[in-house]
Image: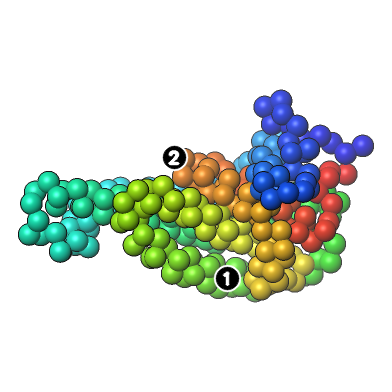
Amino acid sequence: MPEVTTLFGVDVTSIARPVTGVVGRFFSGVGLLLRGIGLYVRSPGLMLLGVVPALISGALYVAAFVALAYFVDDLAALVTPFADDWSGAWRSLIRVIAGLAIVGLAGLLGVLTFTAVTLIIGDPFYETISERVEDRLGGTPGAVEVPFWASLRRSIVDSLRLVAISALVGVPLFAAGFIPVVGQTVIPVIGAAVGGWFLALELTGAPFYRRGLGLGERRSLLRADRPTTLGFGVAVFVCFLIPLGAVLIMPAAIAGATLLARRSLGQSIEET
């Protein structure tokens, strides 16, 4: 009989089962992350494997954001030279908005690049986590043998490509952040959706590579059930915005991403 995965007493196995309707499928994607957390917290071996690379990346990014906070006033003045001759109150207001937009853009890019950097640092660790999750679900149908260095090289290239694309998307969002009201309400929602999509693409790399499938195939398969993919990715994105959330959630997100990849391929996500 398949084992039921619970998290704080809640059956997250049923939450992650496929459902119909856009909203239902979105929350089914959220359920995949919850189930990934459940798999992770019940496996001390996975916890030890996952924490080291995330801690290294976390320390690097904390240092970067401390530096950004220190220089954010100077950066806000640099991107708003047109306000130099404005009255003090208006100049301060526009530069506060600019500072918030800079921090928001840095947060979006930080979340996306953190994933890429941590995946590169922890590639062997996260590959093992993903494999162990698949073993609990009945193995990897269609697995191919990929040499370590070839896998790492392809992972780096794909991560850099995704980061470049996300940066191109982030620049217009940064500019839109200056729009009153819309920039502080609608744009963050769009940013979470965009960030969630790219996170889902990055995190599902290992299980797709294991089957000999590259970024193009990965994108097509995840796009086929976009609401579920976005539900998973946005949930991870929001968790990554919480202080230390990325460090704590990354290994569980890898487990959840393995479930998402298997579902997109029509393979079982029930434990055997």
Q: Residues within 10 Å of mark 1 (few under 14, many from 20)?
A: some
Q: Which mark is residue 158?
A: 1
Q: Amino acid at mark 1?
A: Asp
Total of numbered circles in the picture? 2
Which element is circle 1 on?
helix
Q: Position of residue 37 (x, y in %)?
A: 66, 40
Residue closest to the eye, 47 or 38:
38
In the rendered view of the protein, which quadrant contains the C terminus?
top right
Q: Is residue 123 left or right of residue 77?
A: right
Which element is circle 2 on?
loop
| Residue 85 appears anywhere in the view | yes
Q: Position of residue 232 (x, y in %)?
A: 63, 49
**Image quadrant in which you'd find residue 213:** bottom right
Residue bearing the label numbered 2: 243
Compared to residue 258, the image places residue 220 above or below, namely: below
Q: Position of residue 104 (x, y in %)?
A: 37, 52
Q: Look at 67% across and 27% down and name the residue there.
A: 8
Mark with earlier residue (1, 2): 1
Gap between marks 1 and 2, in whole Å?
Answer: 27 Å
Q: Residue furthest front?
A: 181
Residue closest to the eye, 200 or 92:
92
Q: Residue furthest top?
A: 9
Q: How is the image coloured?
A: rainbow
